[in-house]
Image: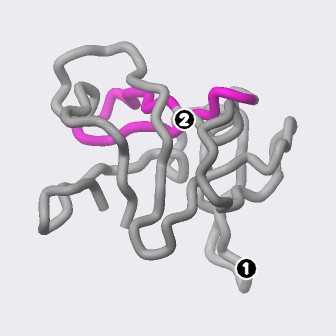
């Protein structure tokens, strides 16, 4: 489960077409933030790290043109979070934004209303 630090994410509700953010994305179960690990090129793994809110932990939510779906783009390197193909090591990587299926993410309200899944 992820917590995105905003009361209302405009992109989720389709009220504007620009990217929203930047946001710090934190896993509720572990308390760690999505982090680029200072990576600057495509193919690098996304990491989690204790939150510090520097550029490599900040993310934009960019509309994909598909209702309810966004791409998650790094402020630091402009790369998108990309779900890898099903392999033995299916961890997300960072790739050039291409609006592909593996770069589309849905924000679903958490049961307690404190964030998104």
Q: Quadrant of the C terminus?
A: bottom left
Q: Which mark is residue 89?
A: 1
46 shown above or below 55: below
* Mark 1 vs mark 2, CA separation in Å: 24 Å
Task: Identify the element where label 2 is drawn.
Answer: strand
The residue depicted at 53 percent of the width and 46 percent of the height is 103
Which residue of the protein is positioned furthest toward the bottom in this rendering? 88
The residue depicted at 44 percent of the width and 27 percent of the height is 62
Q: Which residue is mark 2?
A: 59
Q: Nearer the viewer, residue 47 or 114?
A: 114
91 displayed left or right of 114: right
The residue depicted at 46 percent of the width and 64 percent of the height is 27
112 displayed left or right of 71: left
Are there few (<14), some (14-19), or many (20+) residues within 10 Å of tag 1?
few
Residue 106 spot, x, y in % from top left: 32, 50
Residue 69 covered by magenta stretch = yes
Q: Nearer the viewer, residue 39 or 92?
A: 39
Mark sitting earlier along the chain (1/2): 2
Residue 100 spot, x, y in % from top left: 54, 42
58 shown above or below 17: below
Which residue of the protein is positioned furthest toward the left in this rendering? 112
Residue 94 covered by magenta stretch = no
16 shown above or below 13: above
Residue 57 spot, x, y in % from top left: 63, 42
Residue 1 spot, x, y in % from top left: 37, 67
Q: Are marks 1 and 2 in contact (CB under 8 Å)?
A: no
Q: Nearer the viewer, residue 110 or 97?
A: 110
Are there few (<14), some (14-19), or many (20+) residues within 10 Å of tag 2?
many
Task: Identify the element where label 1 is drawn.
Answer: loop
Q: For the magenta stretch, what is the residue range?
A: 60-76
18 displayed left or right of 107: right
Q: Give the quarter of the image for residue 19.
A: top left
């Amino acid at each position: 489960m992820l917590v995105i630090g905003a009361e209302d994410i405009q992109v989720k509700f389709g009220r504007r077409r620009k990217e929203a953010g930047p946001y710090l994305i934190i896993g509720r179960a572990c308390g760690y933030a999505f982090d680029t690990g200072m990576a600057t090129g495509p193919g690098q793994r996304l990491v989690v790290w204790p939150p510090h809110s520097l550029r490599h932990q900040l993310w934009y939510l960019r509309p994909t043109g598909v209702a309810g779906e966004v791409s998650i783009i790094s402020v630091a390197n402009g790369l998108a979070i990309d779900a890898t193909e099903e392999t033995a090591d299916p961890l997300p990587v960072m790739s050039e934004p291409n609006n592909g299926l593996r770069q589309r993410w849905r924000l679903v309200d958490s049961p307690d209303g404190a964030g998104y899944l």
